């Protein structure tokens, strides 16, 4: 269920998050979606995005790892971000970002999920590779996924810096990380669109320095 306590804009009966107001033709729905996206772009905390970009740049400079993770669509976002920060952001002659998506190793994830718990799929990977001073980036719409909360706790206990790309009201993760970046929408598509765009902002900030 959506972590929002307020009524959701455009929610139809029985929905727990916004898909759309219903009954719109394709053009009207595209306009509705565009307006929801623009609302979030205009409300985006660019100072929070800048703090995330600075943290990634610091990790690059100091040779620290950046470890990104998420579930479902956010797992795909984590993979995309890791690729961009490793490859697209690279500049010849400069130290490169050591970035890895922990959502990509299917055999390790399923071994942990099968033998331990799905709640452990990220924290158990962190136990193998996380070092003090690394940066852990958590991507989540709700901010309430138990495996991400457990990863945040593991990262804190090992002296890592934590950041999160979040939606809705930020959920429990908002208060559990050092650098939360919130897309305060109640529409999952808009949240995920802006999370990926924030990843691109960081990518091309690193590239253009």
Image (cartoon, rainbow, N blue to C red):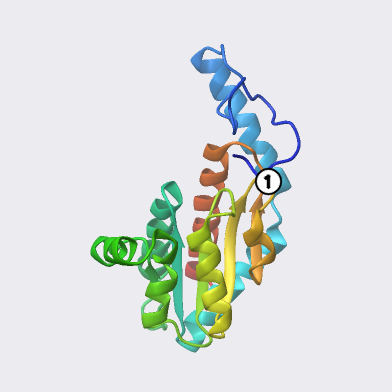
* Mark 1, secondary structure of its residue: loop
Q: Is residue 59 left or right of residue 101?
A: right
Asked whether the viewer can see residue 74, the reply is yes
Rendered position, 21 above or below 109 = above
Rendered position, 41 above or below 26 = below
Residue 110 in the image: state x and y as whole percent: 28, 60
Tell me the residue at 55%/56% (across/down). 198
Tell me the residue at 50%/81% (across/down). 134
When asked about the image quadrant of residue 57, the answer is bottom right
Q: How many marks?
A: 1
Which residue sits furthest left?
A: 107
Residue 66 in the image: state x and y as whole percent: 46, 74
Residue 139 in the image: state x and y as whole percent: 51, 57
Asked whether the viewer can see residue 98, the reply is no
Tell me the residue at 27%/65% (across/down). 111
Q: Is residue 43 left or right of residue 87?
A: right
Rendered position, 93 above or below 185 = below
Q: Residues within 10 Å of mark 1 (few under 14, many from 20)?
A: some
Tell me the residue at 43%/58% (across/down). 78
Residue 125 in the image: state x and y as whole percent: 37, 73
Which residue, given by chain and number where applicable, does mark 1 sit on?
A: 184
Q: Is residue 90 left or right of residue 185?
A: left
Locate the C terminus and report the quarter of the image it occupies: bottom right
Locate the N terminus and report the quarter of the image it occupies: top right
Q: Is residue 50 left or right of residue 77?
A: right
């Amino acid at each position: 269920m959506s972590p929002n306590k307020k009524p959701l804009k455009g929610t139809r009966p029985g929905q727990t998050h916004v898909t759309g107001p219903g009954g719109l033709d394709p053009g009207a729905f595209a306009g509705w979606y565009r307006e929801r996206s623009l609302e979030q772009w205009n409300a985006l905390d660019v100072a929070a995005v800048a703090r995330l970009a600075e943290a990634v740049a610091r990790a690059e400079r100091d040779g620290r790892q950046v470890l990104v993770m998420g579930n479902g669509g956010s797992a795909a976002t984590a993979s995309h971000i890791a690729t961009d920060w490793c490859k697209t952001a690279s500049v010849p002659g400069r130290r490169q970002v050591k970035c890895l998506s922990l959502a990509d190793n299917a055999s390790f994830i399923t071994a942990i999920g099968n033998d331990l718990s799905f709640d452990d799929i990220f924290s158990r990977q962190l136990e193998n590779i996380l070092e003090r001073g690394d940066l852990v980036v958590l991507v989540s719409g709700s901010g309430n996924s138990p495996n991400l909360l457990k990863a945040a706790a593991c990262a804190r206990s090992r002296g890592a810096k934590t950041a999160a790309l979040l939606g809705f009201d930020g959920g429990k993760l908002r208060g559990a990380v050092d650098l939360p970046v919130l897309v305060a929408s109640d529409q999952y598509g808009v949240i995920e669109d802006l999370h990926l765009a924030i990843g691109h902002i960081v990518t091309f900030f690193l590239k253009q320095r």
